[in-house]
Image (spheres, rainbow, N blue to C red):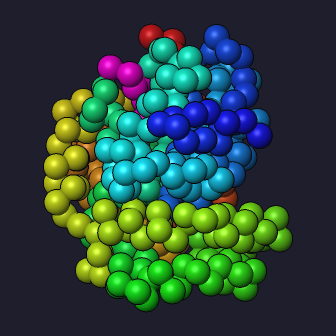
Amino acid sequence: MSWAEVGGRRLRYEVSGPEEAPPIVMLHGIGRSLEDWEPQRPLLSGDHRVITLDMPGFGLSERLPAPVSLAGLADAVWAALDRLGVDRPVHLMGNSLGGAVSMRMVADHPDRVSTLTLANSAGFGPEVTFALRILAVPLLGRSLLRRIDPRSARRIERSIFFDRAHVTDERVAMAVRIGRQPDFAAVYLETARALGGFRGVAAGWRGELLPRVAAARRPTMIVWGERDLILPATHLAAARTLLPYAQTHLFPDTGHMPQLERPGEFAALVRPLLAGVTAG
């Protein structure tokens, strides 16, 4: 377990692969951790420097003092990469919230990004599971988030995967550990409210961010799990319209985390994108 200091707070990260190799940065979703990307590490670190991290206030990382925002999370990731000495363009990969943060990173610093891979990313439509919308209700959301025990954690994990074999005791135990971090509930609620409310994902930040991402025109891959219960697969059609230059792929019988549920297929799919830029 490794730590980087950003803004006086500790962020957890993991790095593997040759130091001189092109860097890949992988970002997780709301309430999640770097473990959601770990199956990709052995598949891509042979010829890339793979960096995963817990964004501020998520996983085991400490929160930053300021209220949570996409801009703040993106800035924190860039600051962490600076601390790690990453001074060349990165291949960004983001799942769910991590996809939205990745897009903000592209919009803010397109010159620092080689490619963008989005897995079931937030930002392409208002629809989101009722379980997340209800967390935006004052008091109720905080009360629900204070009850992360093995039973509730297992229920959450089951909503993420189509193949329930991925709902392991280890994943449930990690979810409980994360849910018991001192700032978990506060950061989760701040993030949910920054992105939307009871009516779903807000249009304002999406309408501002997507044109900037499109203008950057980084080589992009957008993938989705057909059976996603968190962000519906219909968002993939919207993504094709909003980022028409992007490559897209729909994984059948797959939930919210194709990078974890279909690790080999996911890695094989993104490799040509990574190689195309690396070779060029």
Q: Is residue 112 magenta?
A: yes
Give the residue at x 72% y 46%.
Answer: 39
User: Could one spot residue 209 in this view of the protein?
Assistant: yes
Q: Is residue 181 left or right of residue 137?
A: right
- Say which residue appears at 50% left-offset and 22% top-offset: 82
Viewed as shown, does residue 190 lie left or right of 156? left
**What percent of the width, then of the height, locates residue 260?**
66, 54
Q: Nearer the viewer, residue 113 or 228?
A: 113
Q: Quadrant of residue 114?
A: top left
From the viewer's perspective, is 116 left or right of 169? left
* Outermost right residue: 169
Instruction: Name the image quarter holding the C terminus.
Output: top left
Q: Position of residue 244 (x, y in %)?
A: 25, 43
Vertical position of residue 78 compared to residue 266: above or below:
above
- Please determine whether, in this image, residue 7 is positioned above or below residue 33: above
Front residue of 245 and 120: 120
Residue 188 is inside the magenta segment: no
Region of the chain picked out in magenta, as a range: 111-116
Q: Residue 200: give x, y in percent of width and height.
A: 29, 75
The percent position of residue 25, horizontal first and vertical second, equals: 54, 34
Q: Magenta region, mostly helix, strand or loop? A: strand
